Amino acid sequence: MTARRRVAILLAATAPTLACATSDRADDRVNAALPLWMHHPSGAIQVIARRQLAISGLTSGEDYERGRPALDPEHGRVFVGTADHGLYALRSSDGSSIWRFETLAPVQSEPLYDPVLDVVYFGSNDGALYAVHARDGALVFRFMTGAEVSRSPAISGDLLFVANGADQLFAIDRRTGKQRWNVHRGSALGMEVAGYAGPLADRGKVYMAFSDGHVGAYDATDGTERWTPVDLSAEAEQSAGGEAPRYLDVDTTPVVDELPTGRVVYVASYAGGVFALDAETGARVWVNDKAVGVTELVLWTEPAHAPSPFGPYAGGPIVPARKLLLATSSISGLWALDLDPARAGQVKWRVSVPEGGITAPCALAGALLVGTTRYGLFALSPLDGKAMDGLDLGTGFAETPAAFGDRAFTMSNAGTFLGVQVQPPIVR
């Protein structure tokens, strides 16, 4: 059976599950404010760039390309790491190389592009955080953390916050790489799920989740606790009727949101479900204990907008703003949780997981783009999770796509760099 045939069957069965960032000077007319594809499915995913990027003789580790590209839309650059130990800067127009920086181990991370300094920060499995000039890849500094760095750093003022796979959170000077402070929690007792959380910097605080099931908030300037770390493993134990959960991990990078009742932070416990915590106190606001096994969270929003003048609702009332919390789990599927105050945390829709794993979703031209490790790349409707189009190179995708306008970029598990453009159907 061909790869394309497998995708066709999966689309027909609407079985996929599937975060993305958003480069090149893409068509900015395509954005979340445009009507969604709900009434006009089958939009086309077109390949605009494709090249074998990872150097096969240099690759090591598992047969997956993980992480997520970073984008510089203003200069048309894509920054992406590979299993061949390199970080590449590519032209988003055709995927051609600008430069390559080599580290001592695979680069399976989410780089962070700093447009103010024109610097790219990225981690490697060699345990270091690197800062390089975006124009030519020249090294600015190398900060050794002692364990793999795969999550994206976060910036607040002059500080850069980075986490590693040993449950350590560091604050360093974003220009020099000099350490200001660090926080460390001991590893959880028992088994842990692969992966870990990254930091979130927001309004003078840094939020971080740990493999022992705790979530903390720290002062960005000196690392002091802003509230006592919340133990979500205790919450999971209560949900399980007093039985200790097998996995304590909270591996999701926190996500901040503004609700009518105040500011909240979303996190997910692998065993306990998805939580909304008060951003000031850490108090629980709500929990969905059914969405288990979650390793990625994405906040999807769509502004209020007029319906299409050519569609079935032409001339109708303004479509109200919409917001969903998307939770990715390899064991329970892709969840869309309602954030309406009256139904906060309730399931809007859920899509089952195909064989293998899935990436976090990313907003692209009114759709959600997700990758599956065995069945390709898919565009899903954010209204009901149904597949609208897909493609497969035969090796699947474990790297989360990054998108800008109507274009997205990712890497296949065989080390193929892929740029795609999504064109919503023409409404008549």
Image (cartoon, helix red, strand yellow):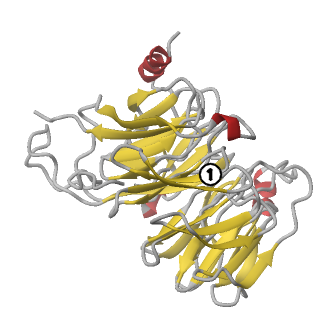
Q: Give the residue drawn at x 54%, y 23%.
A: 394
Q: In the rendered image, which quarter is residue 232 located in?
A: bottom right
**Is 192 located above or below residue 355 in the figure?**
below
- Number of marks drawn: 1
Q: Tag 1: Cα neighbours inside 10 Å, few (<14), some, or many (≥20)? A: many
- Between residue 31 and residue 428, name the one nearer to us: 31
- In-image side of 56 versus 30 (left or right): right
Q: Position of residue 242 (x, y in %)?
A: 86, 54
Whether residue 283 appears in this view of the structure is no
The amino acid at mark 1 is Gly
- State the residue in front, 62 or 391: 62
Q: Which of the pair 138/16 is nearer the observer?
A: 138
Q: Is residue 102 visible?
A: yes
In percent of width and height, residue 301 lies at 38, 58
The answer to whether residue 419 is above or below residue 40 is below
Task: Label 1: state its secondary structure.
Answer: strand
Outermost right residue: 189
Residue 263, given in percent of the width and then of the height, sits at 50, 76
Quarter of the image with the C terminus is top left
Rendered location of residue 318, percent (x, y): 18, 56
Q: Is residue 170 left or right of residue 206?
A: right
Residue corresponding to mark 1: 86
Image-based side of 414 in relation to 390, left or right:
right
The residue sitting at 69% across, 84% down in the picture is: 178
Query: Closer to the camera, 133 or 161?
Result: 133
